Amino acid sequence: MTAEPAIPVSVLTGFLGSGKTTLLSHLLRQPELSRAAVIINEFGEIGLDHELVETSDDTVIALTTGCLCCKVRSDLTETLHDLLRRRDAGTLPQTFDHIVIETSGLADPAPILHALMTDADLAGRLALGSVVTTVDAVAGEGTLAREAVSRKQVAVADRIVLSKLDLADGDAAALLRRVAALNPGAPALCAVRGAIDAATLFADLRRSGAPEIEGWLGEAHAHGHADHDAEITAFSVVRDRPIRAVALTLFLEALAEHCGGDLLRLKGIVNIAESPERPAVIHGVQHVFHAPAWLERWPSADRTSRMVFITRCIPQRWVELLLDAVSAEVECVSDNGSCSRRMG
């Protein structure tokens, strides 16, 4: 029997009042999300947002027990398990092939991503899709300057949506520069009164393949330190020589152990010495990393390893020295014939 494809789970985040619910309401009217289950988290005991999202069935679920990032291990994972049980039992009005989680405006998205990436029972059924962050074109600059969680919401995004452009005075050039400084690789899209193309917004980086990976890495690499926020910075590490599989594994383990919450996002394409024709795509959030995905071929003639980091107060030089030290140690041990670890 052929295994069922994993169901993508997209996360829609953004600070209070940035237009998430308006955007979601428009998205759910489009064919691409006509069979989506939606989980809406609101901060407080009485929730209203789910009442504002037009739907014809009960696949919209409201979590009103507090900030989702604080209760993710219990409320969110249990809700996802329950959705899958109901799907398997056929007790939903219609089955779903996509899940969208709208977070509270005060939620740190990282614990939500952790839950999706680390729950063993969910991992076989669900796959992390795009992280989409809304930014208010009217109040966005002030919010990013004042609220640390809003900067983190932008930093972890795969795509950023500028909302309320019709209400803003002048253009959004300054806001775009601010957003690009926090996350240079995430495309910034514009929603007109909440309207935007669902297929573009929720295209999955890990499913859409090499061209988007190349674009993310290229845009991030083009930015210099002068563009960056004082707290959150983005930088790229490039290596011309192939990296041994075990060296990459040890490097990622060391990052997870020593950097933890300060490593907001990592994406990269890596030339693995043992598999030179099939590059590995890596993806991590804080101390959690996906198993590498393997492309069938290189997307271009460029076969350098390129890793883009979005971090809080982690020096680029420290990361580079760590990678070089681990690689050198692995080379030394391998030359002596005693290197036995392999990347999963």
Image: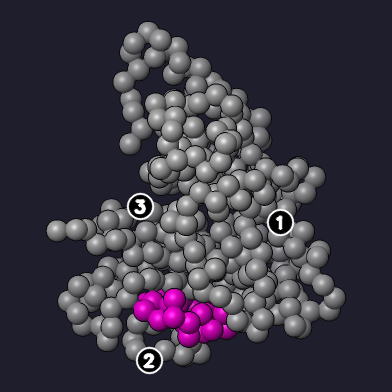
Q: Secondary structure at mark 1?
A: helix
Q: Is residue 155 magenta?
A: no
Q: Which residue is mark 3?
A: 118
Q: Which one is nearer the viewer's eye here, 190 or 275?
A: 275
Report helix, strand or loop for mark 2. loop
Crowding around mark 1 (Cα neighbors within 10 Å: few <14, some 14 to 19, many 20+) is: many
Q: Which mark is residue 56?
A: 2
**Nearer the observer, 149 or 339:** 339
Quadrant occupied by the C terminus: top left
Magenta residue check for 27: yes
Most foreground residue, 81 or 243:
243
Residue 160 is left or right of residue 210, and the answer is right
With respect to residue 86, does 53 lie above or below? below
The span picked out in magenta is 21-44
> Which residue type does callout 3 highlight?
Thr
Amino acid carrying label 2: it is Ser
